[in-house]
Image: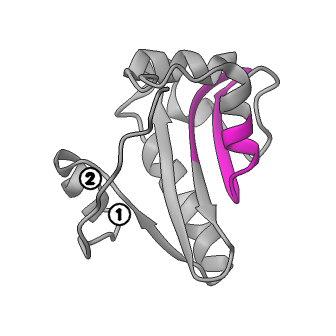
Amino acid sequence: MANAMTIHYTTKPPVDFLQLLRIYELLGWNSLGLTVNELAKMCTQSWYAIYAYDEEQLVGMGRIISDGVITGIICGVCVLPSYQSSGIGKALMEKMIDHCETNRVIPQLMCVESLEPYYEKLGFKKFSIGMTKNKSLG
């Protein structure tokens, strides 16, 4: 793992979303069997997406879904396992929060209960019950 000082952040998407697919698979996030093209579409159609690179290697990303007026839903925040606990996730979150606040959009997110303390340290607080309906795979 590289020193966090060598990580650079940009809104420029990866040339090849295969790198993002690799991160999703290493995290166990690809239960829907998303393709490289679907991941690219997911990111490019988001209101805002930020990527973390170690030189040319994608090591993290996060995105915001929003209409750009009231609420921005932060989602898909991920860091390559070998780069976790080095401040990349926090930096991604700070950049997304800043983007929301600069545009007068309220940043919100959903997370699993075990991550509540992490997001509370970033200024988030529980305000609602989140629910989901499983996507039909048929």
SS at mark 2 in the image: helix
Q: Nearer the viewer, residue 10 or 7?
A: 10
What residue type is disc 1 on? Leu
Seen in the image, is 118 located left or right of residue 74?
A: left
Q: Which mark is residue 12?
A: none
| Percent position of residue 54, x then y | 64, 25
| Percent position of residue 121, x then y | 28, 62
| Percent position of residue 122, x then y | 35, 63
Seen in the image, is 49 located left or right of residue 24?
A: right
Q: Which mark is residue 118?
A: 2
Q: Residues within 10 Å of mark 2 (few under 14, many from 20)?
A: few
Seen at 59% across and 69% down, the residue is 98
Q: Nearer the viewer, residue 8 or 41?
A: 41
Seen in the image, is 23 located left or right of residue 35?
A: left
What residue type is disc 2 on? Tyr
Relative height, residue 127 to residue 110 (above, below): below
Seen at 34% across and 34% down, the residue is 85
Q: Residue furthest front?
A: 138
Q: Is residue 42 magenta?
A: yes
Seen at 80% across and 41% down, the residue is 12
SS at mark 1 in the image: loop
| Percent position of residue 78, x then y | 47, 36
Number of dots carrying numbers: 2
Relative height, residue 5 to residue 98 (above, below): above
Relative height, residue 86 to residue 47 (above, below): above
Seen at 59% across and 79% down, the residue is 105
Residue of label 1: 122
Q: Are marks 1 and 2 in contact (CB under 8 Å)?
A: yes
Distance from label 1 to label 2 (Cα)? 7 Å
* Residues drawn in magenta: 41-62
Q: Is residue 30 magenta?
A: no
Q: Nearer the viewer, residue 130 or 15?
A: 130
